[in-house]
Amino acid sequence: MSHVQIGVIGGSGLYSLPGFEDSEEVNLDTPWGEPSDNYVVGTLAGRRVAFLARHGRGHRILPSELNFRANIFGFKMLGVDRIVSFSACGSLREELPPSTFVLPDQFFDRTRGRASTFFGHGLVAHISFADPVCPELLGALESACRAAEVPVKRGGTYVCMEGPAFSTKAESHVYRAWGMDVIGMTNLQEAKLAREAEICYATVAMVTDFDCWHPQHDAVTAQEVVGNLLKNSENAAKVLLAVLAGIPAKRTCRCGSALADAILTARDKIPAETRQKLDLLVGKYLS
């Protein structure tokens, strides 16, 4: 299998990618267990791409059940250095209607106790996460959305809630008062772990509906939401083709050196088992 540079995570409604050439399924067993599904590796728009269905094909895994560490580490094992994540979301803003693609540059955590770090067990590291999204990848995605003629908003805050139930109206109004823009259940942990793995990460938050704050929310039917999911999936494929053509071969961002000054533990105090488990991430800094 040739080197894979770009990873794609598909969310609700996006369980496969059309147009793959020479594709193969890769089953990986990571130090954190099994990812959500097999990775589908192939060539798309002339680039080697690895695709993972976040919730598994058939949508089998709840957001709170996702093995985020295995999913991101699996991409690292494949050699991926950039991840484009597609995710269904609800809108907290009137000006972000269904079928809009939002490219968040900030996250706000409302989850409870999810594993969101590779570190611990004798190895302490603190990454910088003030700007949680790769600006280089974000710019490429904005250009791709415009090239594909998909309504896009660059920037904004994605509030990551626990789920699986959606928000109460009280919660939804509070998030709006706090200045949040879209709401989902998955992307924060992916972003944190990708940064620890020194992988560029950006998410395409695809609006399917207004959250329950909206006066017309109760009139929205399941059929309408499904219709928006399908439309968003079609647009996601267009955006992906455009972004693959626009991502430069070499990275100029700082994502690839996120751990350079993050490891605090004295090298001779790191347990051998932990060092071995994390060698793919930190080996170059411990030698």
Image (cartoon, helix red, strand yellow):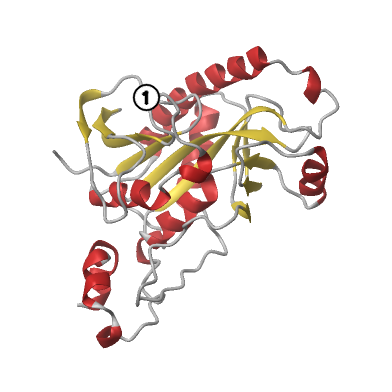
The residue identified by callout 1 is 16
Q: Quadrant of residue 36?
A: top left
Q: Is residue 144 above or below residue 162?
A: above
Image position of 28 (left or right of 186): left
- Determine the secondary structure under disc 1: loop
Is residue 134 at least partly visible in the picture? no
Q: Is residue 274 above or below residue 98?
A: below
The answer to which of 114 and 26 lies nearer the viewer is 114
Q: From the top left corner, tell me how far across and down residue 65 is, in percent.
A: 47, 43
Name the residue type under label 1.
Ser
Quadrant housing the N terminus: top left
Residue at point 29%, 47% (across, down):
74
Residue at point 42%, 30% (across, down):
240
Which residue is outermost to the right?
A: 215
Report crowding for label 1: few under 14, some 14 to 19, many 20 or more residues within 10 A (C-alpha): some
Q: Is residue 20 above or below residue 138?
A: above
Q: Quadrant of residue 121?
A: bottom left
Residue at point 50%, 68% (across, down):
128
Image position of 259 (left or right of 30): right
Residue at point 55%, 30% (across, down):
146
Q: From the top left corner, tell me how far across and down residue 176 is, in percent.
A: 79, 45
Image position of 33 (left or right of 201): left
Is residue 53 at least partly visible in the picture? yes
Q: From the top left corner, tell me how far across and down residue 263 is, in percent.
A: 38, 77
Q: Count the labels in the image.
A: 1
Quadrant housing the C terminus: bottom left
The answer to which of 221 and 181 lies nearer the viewer is 221
Q: Quadrant of residue 167?
A: top right
